[in-house]
Image: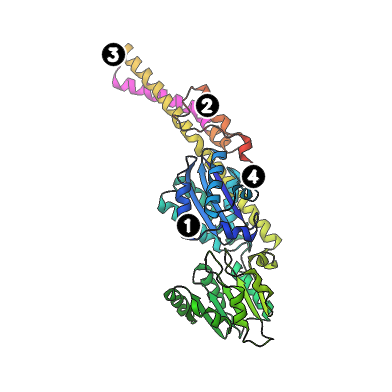
Amino acid sequence: MSLLVVGLSHRSASVDLLDLVVMPPERVELFRDDLARSPFLAEVMVLSTCNRLEVIAEVDRFHGAVSDITDQISKYSGVDRMELTDHVYAPFDEAAIRHVFDVAAGLDSMVIGEQQIVSQLREALRAAQDSGTAAKGLNAVAQRALKAAKRVRSETGIDRHGSSVVSVGLELAGAALGGLAGRSALVIGAGAMSSLAVSALSGEGLRSLVVANRTAATATRLAAAYGARSVALTDMVQEMSEADVVITATGSTGIVVSESDVRRAVAPRSGSREMVVLDLAVPHDTAASIGEVTGVRRIDLTEIARAPRCRASTDDFEAAVRIVAEEVRTFAADRQAQRVEPVLISLRAKADGVIDSQLAALRARLPNLSEVELAAVERSMRRAISELLHLPTVRMKQYAGAAGGERYAEAINVLFDLDPLAAGVAPPVPDSATRETR
């Protein structure tokens, strides 16, 4: 089996396309279960965040797996398959390992070094394991990626500012308003992103903080945790009329805040009072046209991605890249060595079979040999075979992680007439399959 990642992110697709592709948790579950039915996918997990949708899978065929995954993304998003092809990436084998490690370390994030991706990757793995679509292979990749991410954060300062999409968005909002202290804020939504926003806003010295959500109990719990006030979503426009900054992150599939909502909200306000609408949702919660309303500034993920705070220092970034590269090399070598283990097991089993047959023949030819003498002969034979196979075994493990390492396993199969299928050795993948497609 080889690792494959098929996905779209803020690096390969527009926010408008991601709006259509990224899925809420309940859809992700159905999507993952459908993917698991593909004959080309042995294990599968789905990472869905505000700016990426990625399928991480253990596969035995590159092209068939990419085709099946792309078809399912098209089915669930409603986006034509041909349109997706221009934006989908599909790193394979070691390139896929590197990609997962980069994602976990925050090197592929909209805000370089952001920490939220760690919990998102861990949750994606847990959900796949609970559903039975992830096992030993994906667990090994994800756990080692998370370990590499921990090392990046402990050995570099890539996340020293604690930057995240939320913090950068609030920084932009504060700059537009001349600061957040003494201002009033409305957070629409009560999920993970909204909770991060409420937490961050609670330390800004606001005059008032309000949480609005479709489920009143959820809004009440979130607001109570930070000394804020909660309201029903039906009171949204009224609360917007009093707010200086409005943050939306509902996870809804349609527009939550329309241009008419905003116009009604700002109508009673004085002409000099500005409002910032910070849309952190994918799909968008707010209509793009609200940015054309006088006195309203709309900020979305596209603008956040261009902010200087989204980039780490060159030294920290380069140090993180070196750590990830080292961790990837080590893991890829370990993974390759595990692939040749069935060959070594088969080789040892064949050697044991030869010894057993020779001992049986010896007993038949020399029936007068005592058990002590036979045991001495057996020890000598096994010691000799063990010594003979030691160096080839060590060399095969060493070379397994190198380019073309699978040829050593193939040579052992041929030279010793092993059964590669019985040994569990998959045929090598053509070089063309390892190329990343866009």
Pinpoint residue 211: horizontal percent, then vertical percent.
Answer: 51, 78
Q: Residues within 10 Å of mark 1 (few under 14, many from 20)?
A: few
Q: Which stretch appears magenta?
A: 368-393
Q: Amino acid at mark 3?
A: Asn
For marks 4 and 2, give the CA distance: 33 Å
- Disc on the earlier residue, 1 or 2: 1
Q: Is residue 144 above or below residue 306?
A: above
Front of the two marks 1 and 4: 1
For label 1, the residue is 27
Q: Secondary structure at mark 2?
A: helix
> Principal SS element in the magenta part?
helix
- Disc on the earlier residue, 1 or 4: 1
Mark 1 touches mark 2? (CB < 8 Å): no
Can residue 267 be found in the magenta stretch? no
Front of the two marks 4 and 3: 4
- Disc on the earlier residue, 2 or 3: 3
Residue under the image location 45 percent in, 24 percent down: 384
For label 2, the residue is 412
Residue under the image location 57 percent in, 51 percent down: 100
For label 4, the residue is 437
Q: Residues within 10 Å of mark 2 (few under 14, many from 20)?
A: some
- Disc on the earlier residue, 4 or 2: 2
For label 3, the residue is 368
Mark 3 touches mark 1? (CB < 8 Å): no
Pinpoint residue 143: horizontal percent, then vertical percent.
Answer: 50, 52
Q: Secondary structure at mark 3?
A: loop
Colour option used: rainbow
For marks 3 and 1, give the CA distance: 74 Å
